[in-house]
Image (tube, helix red, strand yellow):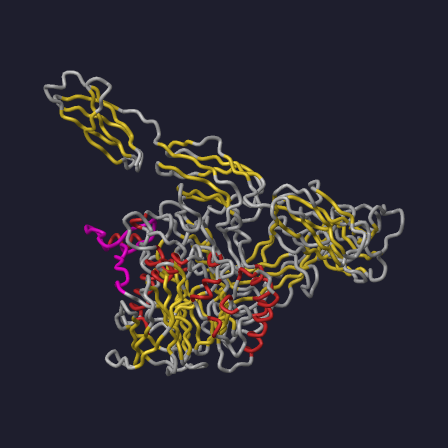
């Protein structure tokens, strides 16, 4: 995710605050800081990586590894390596890829290695030689002789240093913290003796150019990259400035690797590799719902199921499985398509996501599988920033910290465990931001084959009928293992087989969601003190009727118990009365029956559902199909095969007690084929004709309609329409204004969409951006107005200095426009005095879609608070603005002014003084602002 963003008892305090204060009574806190009820050690100092040429390892295999590094202009590539630092007896000659001026990329492959063996090496060119480094070759495939460890760390992104006069990048600091902590956990052994691989889940850069690859990703990884191999995944930012991933493919050699002879069909774009008894599946979330990538996932899963050399499968997908901030900004392909395939084997225990710059962990509802967002240290993200946040029951904790994770799999215990460590919070002051010092905020594990919890029961014994609110009570958690209770799932249904549910929810023993706000921003467990073996049905949770409830328990090994036996109860006196009908799709394929779900009916013995053709009035002509319902809610199938006209519209009605009084809104649907739309391209030059192709159409008066982005079919009037008179053909469209458009086929009523949308744009820089003025005072909000935007969920406004370019220049401020095609947006943030421009960008990218609007920021008009003379001392006092230069001047004639002294404002009150002399019989003073 580019710019912005805005649950573990591991956040338990070191000790209770009062206890701590008693221990230090009469003494200074010294090396500790109190934040709310938490106590943290003062930030450890950063030392950075040693200087000099530091190579980068990647693609570890039991018998080989790739080594690479950068130079400005060298042309030779050599690696000397051997079994000891004094015997670098083997020399490999590599290649140089000239990616640009001052960007020479050196690489060579070391081969004929022995698995799990230490090697020493140095790299050199004709002008430089590195120090000697050590690495450990990858373990043999299937090896279980020693623990396997991986560092998970991602979302680097920011190429600028963290703050003025700070010598380090955010990501550089995060990497140093991780390496320091991991070594401290293992008696300060060299990092290559501890970690097997570093896994990075995408957005290694903010923009895919040479500068960011060399001076961000490779540079900030240099503390670990000479000793431990790094494996990356494609994120959205790798594609910016490198849409075909040409540079990415030249930097990495992932096309060489595969698991079980199953190569990634797109080379470096996505790939899999095996290390020891692990298979890592690096997917590409930017490809969307790719059939080719999906089949590749299925092939890997099928192979891993029966592969005795594989115990664990880990998937990596930059856009996450779920997210509680910036709702919907996930990979729907991973969530709905890839994850169910991967979970066909219980070897798949972890999905690693990124994109959001927070930590999050949850469990897939029906599989023993965890999903995380790794955290990283990129653009700020915090609670309240996105405006769209929700607490989901498949996420156990969302913590707005910059984090990293350590994965450890111990063959002796057959346990894979992940521990998450927090380092900083983006809203803490810069000088006190990295205060957490690798604080453990989460720990979770998986042991395959361990016994499940015992089957619970619902202990309710109340005599029906019951009234709401009402509490379902689960029996206490019990198990034959040492695992504790993690979650309880409750289901309530009107049918005893629970094929449809009225309530289906998972409640975790902890649920970290939100934080305490300023000044500490500590995570909040909103389930603290909650008894999750009880679940209250609220006053409006269910309408009157008979229901079945059941429960099951999940332990902290992500394993569910069996379901309890159903508990049957009847509700009366409920104030929930909102009968409704639902069908799976508004388009019913020809010659198929229709499944109808009904809810919250009155429960009369002869309530019924009827199907009518559009325009018919119930009670007049007989229904085409009908059926009584059973109870207030449930499912039924209407036999419609062969009874409905293709290309016609129908509706379903919910009727009361053998009469024609309708209980709920009608549900319209179309019986026929979904029309397929296509075009030769999705970007057209301004003035160019557009052709939309259609096929599989019903010749029934349906229309292909054209809308601008942001319009709503069925509510807004289309720009143009074309009646379909053949099963296939094309619609030529001429004389369109530049803009963002989409086409969709609608049934002849105009309200039912019977095709997917087909989007395209005509012209470049289509959106119009305006400001009401061109000059703003320091601290003044900027109100921008935009029109004709593309209406993507992540369109955003960005502010840059004049002369700097998006993607390479420094992004000074940004704000998302919430998927709107037009509107007003307020940019709230102090900008230093200077010249800037504002532009609209599309869908989290650096692609500009509007004109640039220039503006200047000038100092605020200020006044002196006081001017006094005491003896021979003149003093001037006023409130300063941070970053503004003030100069005290003196004049004898109000024409010629002399500079006396200067002051750089810091936001506080300033006093400038001047000593008067006997010659100052008549003089004037003023303070002027001098822009830098």
Expressed as whole percent of the image width and height from the top left, the position of residue 694 reads: 73, 55
The question of residue 399 being in magenta is answered with: no
- Dominant SS in magenta: loop
820 over 121 or under it: above or below:
above
Q: Horizontal and vertical percent for residue 697?
A: 77, 56
Question: Would residue 118 be visible to someone looking at this image?
Answer: yes
Apparent side of residue 241 relative to residue 910 in the rendered image (left or right): right
Q: Quadrant of the C terminus?
A: top left
Residue 532 visible in this rendered orientation of the protein: no
Residue 688: x and y in percent read: 64, 47
For the residue pair 710 and 841, the one nearer the viewer reads as 841
Look at the image and say whether residue 32 sits in the magenta stretch.
yes
Front-lying residue, 458 or 84: 84
Q: Residue at x 49, y 79 (%)?
A: 310
Q: Is residue 293 left or right of residue 897?
A: right
Residue 398 versus residue 876 in the image, above or below: below
Decide: is 553 above or below 448.
Answer: above
Q: Is residue 250 left or right of residue 696?
A: left
Where residue 734 appears, x then y in whole percent?
69, 44
Q: Residue furthest right?
A: 621
Q: Quadrant of residue 338?
A: bottom right
In the shown orientation, is residue 806 left or right of residue 663? left
Residue 300 versus residue 24 in the image, above or below: below
What stretch of residues is rendered in magenta? 23-52
């Amino acid at each position: 995710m580019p710019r912005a963003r805005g649950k573990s008892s591991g956040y338990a305090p070191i000790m209770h605050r009062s206890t701590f204060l008693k221990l230090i009574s009469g003494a200074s806190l010294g090396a500790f800081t109190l934040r709310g009820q938490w106590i943290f050690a003062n930030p450890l100092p950063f030392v950075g990586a040693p200087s000099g040429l530091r190579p980068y390892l990647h693609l570890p295999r039991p018998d080989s590894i790739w080594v690479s590094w950068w130079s400005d202009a060298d042309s030779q590539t050599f690696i000397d390596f051997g079994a000891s630092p004094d015997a670098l007896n083997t020399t490999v000659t590599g290649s140089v890829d000239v990616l640009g001026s001052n960007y020479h990329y050196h690489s060579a492959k070391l081969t004929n290695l022995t698995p799990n063996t230490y090697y020493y090496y140095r790299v050199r060119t004709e002008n430089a030689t590195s120090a000697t480094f050590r690495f450990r070759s990858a373990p043999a495939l299937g090896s279980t002789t020693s623990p396997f460890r991986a560092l998970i760390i991602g979302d680097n992104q920011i190429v600028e240093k963290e703050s003025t006069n700070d010598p380090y990048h955010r990501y550089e600091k995060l990497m140093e913290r991780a390496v320091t902590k991991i070594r401290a956990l293992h008696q300060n052994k060299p990092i290559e003796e501890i970690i097997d691989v570093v896994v990075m889940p995408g957005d290694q850069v903010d923009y895919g150019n040479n500068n960011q690859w060399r001076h961000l990703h490779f540079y900030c990884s240099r503390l670990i990259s000479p000793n431990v191999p790094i494996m990356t995944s494609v994120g959205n930012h790798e594609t910016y400035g490198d849409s075909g991933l040409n540079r990415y493919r030249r930097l990495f050699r992932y096309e060489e690797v595969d698991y079980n002879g199953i190569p990634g069909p797109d080379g470096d774009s996505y790939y899999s590799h095996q290390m020891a008894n692990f298979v890592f599946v690096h997917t590409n979330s930017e490809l969307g719902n790719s059939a080719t990538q999906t089949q590749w996932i299925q092939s890997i899963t099928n192979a891993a199921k029966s592969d005795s050399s594989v115990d664990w499968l880990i998937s990596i997908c930059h856009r996450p499985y779920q997210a509680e901030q910036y709702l919907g900004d996930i990979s729907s392909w991973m969530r709905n398509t890839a994850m169910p395939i991967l979970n066909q084997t219980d070897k798949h225990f972890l999905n690693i996501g990124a994109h959001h710059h927070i930590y999050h962990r949850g469990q897939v509802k029906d599989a023993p599988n965890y999903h995380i967002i790794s955290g990283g240290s990129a653009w700020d993200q915090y609670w309240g920033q996105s405006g769209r946040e929700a607490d989901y029951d498949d996420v156990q904790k969302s913590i707005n910290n910059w984090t990293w994770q350590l994965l450890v799999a111990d063959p002796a215990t057959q346990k894979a465990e992940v521990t998450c460590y927090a380092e900083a919070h983006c809203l803490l002051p810069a000088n006190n931001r990295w205060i957490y010092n690798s604080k453990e905020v989460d720990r979770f594990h998986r042991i395959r084959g361990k016994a499940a919890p015992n089957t619970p029961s619902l202990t309710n014994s109340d005599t029906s009928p019951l009234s709401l609110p009402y509490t379902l009570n689960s029996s206490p958690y019990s198990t034959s293992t040492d695992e504790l209770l993690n979650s309880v799932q409750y289901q309530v249904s009107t049918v005893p087989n629970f094929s449809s549910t009225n309530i289906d929810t998972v409640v975790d023993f902890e649920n970290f969601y939100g934080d305490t706000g300023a000044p500490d921003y500590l995570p909040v467990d909103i389930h603290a003190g909650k008894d999750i073996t009880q679940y209250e049905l609220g006053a409006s949770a269910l309408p009157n009727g008979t229901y079945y409830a059941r429960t099951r328990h999940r332990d902290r090994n992500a394993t569910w118990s069996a379901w309890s036996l159903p508990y049957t109860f009847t509700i009366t006196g409920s104030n929930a009365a909102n009968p409704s009908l639902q069908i799976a799709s508004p388009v019913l394929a020809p010659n198929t029956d229709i499944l109808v779900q009904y809810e919250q009916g009155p429960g009369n013995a002869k309530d019924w559902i009827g199907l009518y053709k559009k325009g018919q009035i119930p009670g007049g002509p007989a229904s085409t199909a009908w059926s009584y319902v059973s109870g207030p809610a449930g499912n039924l199938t209407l036999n419609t095969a062969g009874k409905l006209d293709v290309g016609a519209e129908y509706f379903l009605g919910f009727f009361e007690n053998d009469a024609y009084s309708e209980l709920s809104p009608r549900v319209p649907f179309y019986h026929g084929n979904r029309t397929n739309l296509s075009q030769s391209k999705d970007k057209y030059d301004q003035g160019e004709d557009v052709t939309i192709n259609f096929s599989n159409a019903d010749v029934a008066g349906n229309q292909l309609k054209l809308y601008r982005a942001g319009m709503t079919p069925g509510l807004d009037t289309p720009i143009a329409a074309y009646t379909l008179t053949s099963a296939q053909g094309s619609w030529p469209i001429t004389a369109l204004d530049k803009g963002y458009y989409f086409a969709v086929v609608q049934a002849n009523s105009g309200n039912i969409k019977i095709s997917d949308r087909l989007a395209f744009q005509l012209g470049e820089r289509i959106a119009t951006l305006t400001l009401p003025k061109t000059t703003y005072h320091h601290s003044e909000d900027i109100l921008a107005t935009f029109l004709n935007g593309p209406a993507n969920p992540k369109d955003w406004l960005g502010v840059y200095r004049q002369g700097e370019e998006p993607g390479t220049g420094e992004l000074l401020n940004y704000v998302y426009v919430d998927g709107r095609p037009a509107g007003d947006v307020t940019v709230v943030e102090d900008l230093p005095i200077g010249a800037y421009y504002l532009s609209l960008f599309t869908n989290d990218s650096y692609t500009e879609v509007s004109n640039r609007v220039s503006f200047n920021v000038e100092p605020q008009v200020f006044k002196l608070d006081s001017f006094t003379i005491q003896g021979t001392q003149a003093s001037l006092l006023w409130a300063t603005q941070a970053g503004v230069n003030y100069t005290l001047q003196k004049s004898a004639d109000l024409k010629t002014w002399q500079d006396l002294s200067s002051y750089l404002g810091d936001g506080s009150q300033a006093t400038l003084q001047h000593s008067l002399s006997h010659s100052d019989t008549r003089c004037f003073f003023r303070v002027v602002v001098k822009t830098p």
